[in-house]
Structure formats: C-alpha cells, structure tokens
Amino acid sequence: MNGSEIQIKNVNMIYKGKRGEDIVALNDVNLDIREGEFISLLGPSGCGKTTLLRIIADLLRPTTGSVTINGQSPKDIRLQRKYGIVFQNPVLYDWRTVRRNICLPMEIMKIPRKERTARIDKTLDLVGLKDFGYEYPFELSGGMQQRIGIARALALDPEILLMDEPFSALDEFTREKLNEDLLKIWRKTKKTIIFVTHNIPESVFLSDRVVVLSPHPGRVSAVVDIDLPRPRESSLREMPEFYEYVAKIRKSFEGV
Ligand SMILES: Nc1ncnc2c1ncn2[C@@H]1O[C@H](COP(=O)(O)OP(=O)(O)OP(=O)(O)O)[C@@H](O)[C@H]1O
C-alpha cells in the first residue's frame, strides 16, 4: 500500500490531576505515518511520547481527535492483533525458558503448537538468540532480555511495532548494537515501527523521520526527515551528516 497508514488528527489528551485540575499531555497533534516507515517520537520527559504511543495502541482514548489505521480504529487493529508492543522493561517470566516466554502470547491466542514452534525458531533467529532458547531469562544480560521482548512481539507477526524506550535502560555499547540489529530486523520484516526515545543520536540513526515533541503541553514542534543512506551501520555515527542532524534536532529543543 502507498500513502499513509496511520493518520493522527487533532489529537488532544487531557488527564485529570490529583486535585481535579487539567493536565494537558497532548495538544492538537497531527501526524501521518506511512506503511513500513521507521518513525521516532523524540522529546524530553513528560512531553507526551508514551501517551501518544498508548493512544495509537488503543491503551488510551484521546480526549478529542482521532487515530485511524488504514481507515480502521485502533480498537479494530488491536482486536485483530496487528500491534506488537515492546516496553522499556520486557517483563519476562524467570521460571519459563526463553522459548516459553516467547511462546506465552501465542498460547493465549491458541496458535497451534506446530506453528508456535516454527515462529519461535524464526524470531529467535531474527533477534540473534538461536542458541539461547533453553536458557532462563535471569541467566541472560539486559540486552539479551530486551531481544527476547522483541522476539515475543514479533512472534505474533504484527503489522505495526510500537516500541517505548526499549533500550534506554541499557549501556551505550549494548544500545548501539541493538540499534543496528533492530534495523536489520526492520529490513527483513518490513514492519511499520514507531519508536519512542529521548536519545537524539538514537532517533537519527534509526529513523526515516523524527517527530520532535515539546512539553507543556505536548505538541509536535518539528518533523525532521533523516535523509541518510541505508543500510545504516555503526560507521554512520562518525559521518558529518549524522552530526548535522543531531545538532539540528538538538537546536530545536533550545528554549524548551
Ligand atoms: N495517568 C495520568 N494521570 C495524570 N497525568 C498523567 C498521566 N499519565 C501521564 N500524565 C502526565 O502527562 C504528561 C505526559 O506524560 P507521558 O508519560 O506521556 O510523557 P513522556 O514524554 O512519555 O515522558 P517520559 O519520557 O518521562 O516517559 C506528563 O506531564 C505526565 O505527568
């Protein structure tokens, strides 16, 4: 399909504070996301990134405005299980092996055993954990645990992968490696990815477009096309063009 897959129109989100006061988390957000696009939602803490992601995922209803995905509502898409979600903390069950952690949502969905096994094999291979299927999560590093979270989301074969600061708890080296691997996974699976981060270089490295959100109230302050060649590898981070994008985006936060 060509054109935009996800349309976010005039979305406002107002929470109620403890004393009943209004907290405007999102103010008139408009955004079109294309099918197969890698898009980052970037901004400082409290600018509404997670709120926007949760609205797209149908985990929250906006106060006003709408989100449509190929003409359907987020609820329709959620019920068709077309979303895969990866959180900052993958929440793994330590008494289940890696394979059985990836399997759990498929068991809940009653996907037949043979199909489950095939999908586990495929996604373990995709995330580079082929030899770790029979280990337990607590035996693995934070980066490997996050790979399990990604495999678990991909095993349901979603169309849209929503990632909420998935690498922010990891050290810099592991984060950069996972960034590169995520791009390989994206290239192979052709998912639409919406990636929340507050890390500017990470957003530049990964994205086709970076959506810059500024806080109080959260609004889109810039949308930056990242016109850097693909496939992207770690050497890209040393290129002047890369630095220029980082500097340009950093500048857009000045005074925020
Ligand atoms: N359930 C809630 N009730 C009241 N206010 C909320 C609620 N959830 C979020 N907020 C407020 O809405 C604003 C946006 O929050 P949100 O978590 O979406 O931001 P964020 O950019 O994802 O932040 P972070 O990077 O810290 O996760 C913040 O001011 C936050 O305090």
Image (cartoon, rainbow, N blue to C red):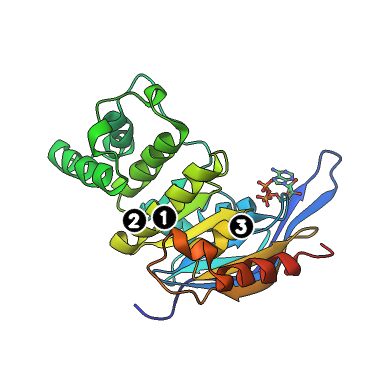
Label 3 neighbour load within 10 Å: few <14, some 14-19, many 20+: many
Q: CA distance from mark 3 to mark 2?
A: 24 Å
Is 17 drawn above or below residue 44 in the view shown?
above
Left or right position of 64 against 4: right
- Tell me, for residue 185, which label it has, or none: 2
Looking at the rendered structure, the kind of residue marked 2 is Ile
Expressed as whole percent of the image width and height from the top left, the position of residue 43 reads 68, 58
Question: Of callouts 2 and 1, which one flags the residue occurring earlier in the amino acid sequence?
Answer: 1
The answer to whether mark 1 and mark 3 are in CB contact below 8 A is no
- Nearer mark to the viewer, of 1 and 3: 1
- Tell me, for residue 108, which label it has, or none: none
Is 203 drawn above or below residue 174 in the view shown?
below
Furthest residue to the bottom?
3
Expressed as whole percent of the image width and height from the top left, the position of residue 47 reads 72, 55
- Tell me, for residue 180, which label it has, or none: 1
Question: Of callouts 3 and 2, which one flags the residue occurring earlier in the amino acid sequence?
Answer: 3
Could you tell me which secondary element the residue under label 2 belongs to? helix
Residue annotated with mark 3: 52
Looking at the rendered structure, the kind of residue marked 1 is Glu
Expressed as whole percent of the image width and height from the top left, the position of residue 4 reads 46, 76
Label 2 neighbour load within 10 Å: few <14, some 14-19, many 20+: some
* Number of numbered discs: 3
